[in-house]
Image (spheres, helix red, strand yellow):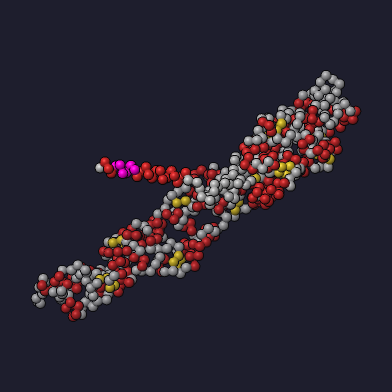
Amino acid sequence: MAVTRTMRLWRILALAAFTAGVLAAPAGAGAADRKFKRKECLDCHTEEAKKFSAFRFTHEAVKKGECEACHQRHGIVPKLLLKESGNKLCYSCHKPASIGMDQPNVHAVLRTGSCTQCHAVHGSNAPHMLKAEGSAACWECHDRKAFERKNVHPVLAKEGCGACHATHASAQKSLLKAEEGQLCVKCHAPTSGGFAKAHGGYPVAGKRCSACHEPHSSDQPKLMKASVHSALSGGCDQCHAAPSSPKPFAVQEAGGKLCANCHDAKDVTKGQKVVHAPVRKEECVACHDPHASNNPAMTRAAGAALCTGCHAGKDARKLVAHKPMSGPKACLGCHQPHAAPVKGLLAAEVSKSCAACHPKVAEQTKRKVVHVPFADGECATCHDPHGSDFPGMTGSRQDKLCFGCHADAETRFVKAHTHKPVLEGKCSACHAGHSADRPKLLKTDGAKMCQGCHGELMKLASAGVVHKPFAEGACLTCHDPHGSNAGGMIVKDQKALCLSCHAKVAANSESAKSVHAAFASGECTKCHNPHGAKLKGLLNAAGPDLCFSCHTKQKEKMAGETRHAPADDCLSCHSPHQSAQPKLTSEPVGALCEQCHDVKASQFSTRHAGIDPKVMHCVACHDPHSSKDPKFLKTAVHPPFAARQCDSCHLPVAAK
């Protein structure tokens, strides 16, 4: 054992020495050390290299060939992987504070958008690597029409937007480079005679020039706003203190009293009984700018924006907008601004106001049946006059709107089986909202209404046999148009509904010994189509297939055996609804069999051991439907009987 261990040890040492020698041995002539030469990105991306070299202004990283300053070297080809997403990548070199991100007013595109909306990432022919030069870069977001009217501010035309605005951020609103008044006086010297004369000697230097002037362009001389207070033509001292007074901009009277010097209250309200709150409180400047405005009548905002400053939410975006709200008149399409004869400052009663734009709808009051709110001119009972998220600009979903007045209908309509339009809240699928020529505001008559949705079903009216109510279009004889707890939305359970017309069938069942299970449970439609069918009796299928739809075991048995000929027509022996006999047989069993089998024949007597046919019960021995036996004997029979040896058990009766 010791010798074996020694041998193993020498083998291990020898293997280690050999391995060390191999590793230490010099490489062969064909196995020189492998070295890789680094290739720069643009060595392969030659098209990009040509493009970048043509730019007047190139990104510093591109100049230095430092593509990896922004891109990861290894990515998913051909997708370029950036080291950071969005503006974070730019901020790695351009610190947020250095571009003004800590200022109170930051350019919206920088705060919520991307640097690349304005700047090209690799290079550009415009300064600061902008995608466009000068003001053209601003036109990407700002509509240039407001900056190119008849008279353009010279500094804008010459130097562009950057003359007054900071590009990224500012301590001033609108990204101005300085406070508005101080910015203007850099070009417009207040000490010049022309400046003082134009402003009536008032010390306006440093004040808010945009109160009267458009800073970019205007269709008026001197860049004046579109709508200017007429008092300015007579001199500012009509409203303000003298320019030489200690407080030259102080007004001569407070609030509406000052306006009343020129605008008589009676002219403003025209004697109307409903007065707008700001007018009543003499707060004219709540809506009007006292100097100038770009809006008609010197209003502080355009269109609905003026009103929604106080009436919040009325301008909320809706799926179905009222056209006047977005039109030039906006709220004034229906309302008066100062005073009106009708509540809500409406220019006229609600119905008359609506009829002014909807004359065809107004004419519907002449029809036979008029919806009560519509007849009373209460359009706003159903419609939201400012806009809605529902079709027809209704105040809410149709069913909720209708149930608001027809409260009892909700419990009557919503059942276990509810009509689809009711379930979806589409009352207008059947009913007109304003008026109609039919009772209950129905849009059309009888079956025509149903045909709109159930067109395929109505084609059954041309079938071979049509149910009388269906043929007459009297759908509501059987169905509830809104909902029912009975299947098929029928007005009562199936059995009661059918027997209300088929009274004779009901009367016969009371004295019957056997009743068809489907009939007893009131499942008439298992056999009959309630609308129309090609078979007599409105049967769903011909016998015996109709019967086999329930009697499946009988079907399987008959499929593998010899059929009794009458079994091909179940009604040859059975009654479909009820019978005075067991098993729904139409007559006693013996009488049925005698219709085909001559019981007086000698052969019949011989085969039946001379037994009197009157005491026989044929189905005691024979299967009336099918059998594997040629004489239709039942499968399980007494052996002597199977061998036709009746006398083994029965003794013949001696003749008298």
Look at 68% across and 30% down and name the residue there: 103
Q: Which residues are magenta?
A: 5-10
Picture quadrant where residue 210 is located: top right
Look at 68% across and 49% down and name the residue there: 48
* Quadrant in the picture for the N terminus: top left
The answer to whether one can see residue 141 in this image is no
Spot occupied by residue 246 in the image (x, y as percentages of width and height):
83, 19
Residue closer to the observer: 306 or 149: 149
Q: Is residue 23 above or below residue 618?
A: above
Residue closer to the observer: 15 or 131: 15
Residue closer to the observer: 562 or 656: 562
Picture quadrant where residue 383 is located: top right
The answer to whether one can see residue 289 in this image is yes
Question: Magenta stretch mostly in which secondary structure?
Answer: helix
| In the image, farthest residue toward the right | 193
Spot occupied by residue 528 in the image (x, y as percentages of width and height):
40, 63
Task: Examine the structure image and report whether residue 56 is included in the region drawn in magenta.
Answer: no
Picture quadrant where residue 373 is located: top right
Q: Is residue 33 above or below residue 285?
A: below
In this rendering, would 332 be left or right of 535? Answer: right
* Quadrant in the picture for the C terminus: bottom left
